[in-house]
Amino acid sequence: MLSNNRGQVFIESILILPVCLLGFIYIIYVLLFFTVEIAIDDALESRLICEIQSKASCQHQLARHLQYLPITEINLQFNQIGSKGTVTFDGRVLHFFQIKKARSLNYETRI
Amino acid sequence: MKLAYNHNKGFFSLHFVLFLLLVTAVVNGYALVFYAQQQKDLFRKTCFNDLPRIQTQLVRFEKQLFSLNPLSSILRQRLHTLKIQRVAAIASKNWPLAAKLTFDIQKTVHSQVRLDHVQKKIISTATQFLKTNMSLLVKNLSTSNNFQYLIWSYFVSAKNKYYLENNVQLAIQSDSIGGLAPNYELKSDYRRIQSLNLNLQHEYLNNKKFQTLLNTHQKHHFSCTVSFSRKGDEWHLAINQDKF
């Protein structure tokens, strides 16, 4: 195809560019996923801590935290047995990654 | 186009510089996130572990003090009865009985003195515990904060102010009768008097040398109050944490 090396880099760049672009986008997606995962962890922990404080708006607080994140198909459950609270989260981040998390906290406020 | 692609010298170097800028921006961003998360975790740990531990121990001291109330009441009642009996014995000129009752009164007063000593010892131990642990907490907060800042100082510039209220006291008082070895009870606004308050003003931005690449400035105010509530024999911790 090429009689000499002229334009070799240009042609190779055009061939590799889509792959590099996809790889670059995937890396950005993964980084965003980590960030969203940290935010979800924090929101779940805040939910459990809210229950310890016996506040009324805990459910709304969690929903408010999650509404700013790129998550769809959210399924949240909260269970309390005695002093142990468990919150389970299931959702799709960035329309691509599926996350399932469960956090428990056992906190006795009786002295 | 023709000039640019005459040769491929410097192709990698040019693209690597752009890649390096991107990586620096990402690393800076994550450094800020992790630093903020660490500060928040430190505050949460203090609010839900350290302050409740101190408050729980203070309540235990108070319970110990209140458990001596029945004995205090018994001694008070006994002294009162003996005094009445002695007056009656003196009035009826029953000197042996009056002497015995005087001796019993002295024994009762001596018991009251010992009980009073025990009560005051509990109060002073509790007060000392509170002062010592609050000072230690302030010192540990400062050390942890400095240590965390040291880890991220290459990327982050921060100003943190921890305020821990220093004038907390035991919310107890002697009852209206007072005197030697009295009954002790909680003050009416015990929730406010014995509440442990911690405030954090947290302000951070990325380091000056990276500000041309990524410029961010965040300010948060965290507040935590740990008190207790009592309903009959049930004592519960009351924790309130807020972010502004």
Image (cartoon, coloured by chain):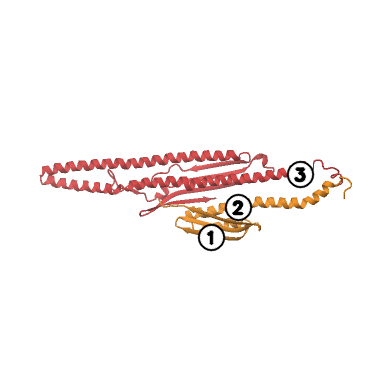
Looking at the rendered structure, the secondary structure element under dot 1 is: strand
- Residue B19 located left or right of residue A64: right
The disc numbered 1 marks a residue on which chain?
A: A
Q: State which chain disc 2 sits on.
A: A
Which residue carries the number 1 mark? A77
The dot on residue B15 is 3
Q: Residue at x 47, y 48 (%)?
A: B225
For badge 1, the amino acid type reads Gln
Determine the secondary structure under disc 2: helix
Label 2 in the same subunit as label 1? yes
Q: Colour of chain B?
A: red
Q: What residue sits right under mark 2 in the picture?
A: A37
Q: In the figure, is residue B140 to the left or right of B113?
A: right
Q: Residue at x 18, y 46 (%)?
A: B82
Is the residue at mark 3 from the same chain as the one at mark 1?
no
Residue A34 visible = yes
Kindly indicate whether the residue at mark 1 contacts the one at mark 3 (C-beta within 8 angstroms): no
Locate residue B9, reporting x and y percent.
82, 41
Q: Which comes sooner in the sequence, label 2 or label 1?
A: 2
Q: CA distance from mark 2 to mark 1?
A: 18 Å
Q: Which chain is orange?
A: A
Tell me where residue B173 appears, x and y as whole percent.
34, 46
Q: Residue at x 69, y 52 (%)?
A: A26
Q: Position of residue B114 (x, y in %)?
A: 27, 40
Mark 2 closeness class: few <14, some 14–19, many ≥20 residues within 10 Å? some
Residue B94: image location, x then y, percent: 10, 44
Which amino acid type is marked by label 3? His
What is the tally of numbered marks visible in this picture? Answer: 3
As drawn, the residue found furthest toward the left would be B93
Instruction: Identify residue type, mark 2.
Output: Glu
Label 3 and label 2 in one chain: no
